[in-house]
Image: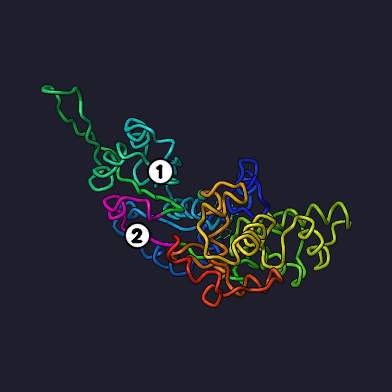
Amino acid sequence: MATDRLISAQATPQEEQINWALRPTDISSYVGQSELIERLRIAIAAAKQRSEPMEHVLLHGPPGLGKTTLAHVLATEMGSGVTATSGPSLARGTDLVTALQRLNQGDVLFIDEIHRLPIAVEEFIYPAMEDFRIDLTLDSGLSARTVQIKCKPFTLIGATTRAGLLSSPLRSRFGIVHHLRYYTREELLLILSRSAGLLNMGALPAPAATMIADRSRGTPRIANRLLRRVRDFAQVRHKGVVNADVVEAALSLEGVDSLGLDELDRKYLRTIAGTYRCGPVGLEAIAATMNEDSGTLEDVVEPFLLQIGFLARTRRGRALTRAAANHLGITFIDPDADPAKSTSLFND
Ligand SMILES: Nc1ncnc2c1ncn2[C@@H]1O[C@H](COP(=O)(O)OP(=O)(O)O)[C@@H](O)[C@H]1O
Ligand SMILES: [Mg+2]
């Protein structure tokens, strides 16, 4: 299944536990995202001076970049507790009310996948965010009345992979809205060296660490996962010795290539190349040919291919780029120079 991929940025439940151990807990060990960290440090210091909770924060960006981690780090910095929940698990207004009433002064309420918060629940969140107040409507019809319940001042931290799906009233109630970036090689190397220490692997030789970093798709969660695969492989086949050859062997056994692409990415690219002459072609057609779900392709395969310039999304559909063709070792067909496609504008 697509979600079981080694290079998937999504976490599996078993993995969440291991991740927990690898998670930085204070702001100084949180690697990268420097502009965001700078903004947050100021917000924290200002809030502390005023003895108020920190402003509400919305973090958005692809999975595995450290949104959940950062929410916990922020609570630690504020010296406050965290209640973690998610959009889908707050199915009714009362679920949110219960969560809000349990908060202590200055606590963090972390809502993951906040774009999946039901609209009925959103209505409760507005007065809570603005005035730390919950408006409850009792009874219905003519006898309906609204009672207001106070909740303790708190900080809402929302996380989402799909900021575009958030309603604008909700979005506008966050004081700080920030997009998390993919990590650079240097940042991933820092994370890997810290994780290797925590996993008792000792210091990684630089070429081996760089090889893992370069196959991690700019994503800490993937870096940590590849590191664990390398650790297993080294332990079973090489008496625990990790070097570039061992990393190469471990990761090619897993089907991860030099850019971090796996079998599913390559199948996707080859489908566009082989069946659709490098595109442009609609996502649904690709999904049908591959016998995959189009939503899965859009969420887990395409973002990284777009990021590295292997895929172009045009009005007429998805198209392969020359760089992708070079990487796969196939002949590039330029859609603008392909006579077979000159009429496709009118066929769409
Ligand atoms: N900035 C960072 N510094 C160090 N490790 C990180 C960082 N961001 C993420 N990680 C690692 O990646 C894993 C996944 O991060 P997580 O916060 O769960 O991502 P998200 O919530 O964005 O999907 C964490 O368990 C942690 O080990
Ligand atoms: Mg998360």
Q: Which residue is mark 1?
A: 116
**Position of residue 173 measured from the top left corner of the image (x, y, whole percent):** 28, 53
* 250 or 276: nearer the viewer: 276
User: Foreground mark, 2 or 1?
Assistant: 1
Where residue 112 appears, as percent x and y from the top left, is 45, 46
| Residues shaded magenta | 163-179
Q: Residue furthest bottom?
A: 337
> Horizontally, is 116 left or right of 208 in the view?
left
Magenta stretch encompasses residue 169: yes
Q: Please state if 135 lies on the left or on the right of 303 as rendered.
A: left
Q: How many marks?
A: 2
- The reply to whether the magenta stretch includes residue 210 is no
Type of amino acid at the residue the image marks with label 2: Ile
- Please state the horizontal and vertical placement of residue 98, each as a whole percent of the image: 35, 31
- Residue located beneath label 2 in the image: 176
- Residue 182 to residue 167: above or below: below
- Asked which secondary structure carries label 2, the reply is strand
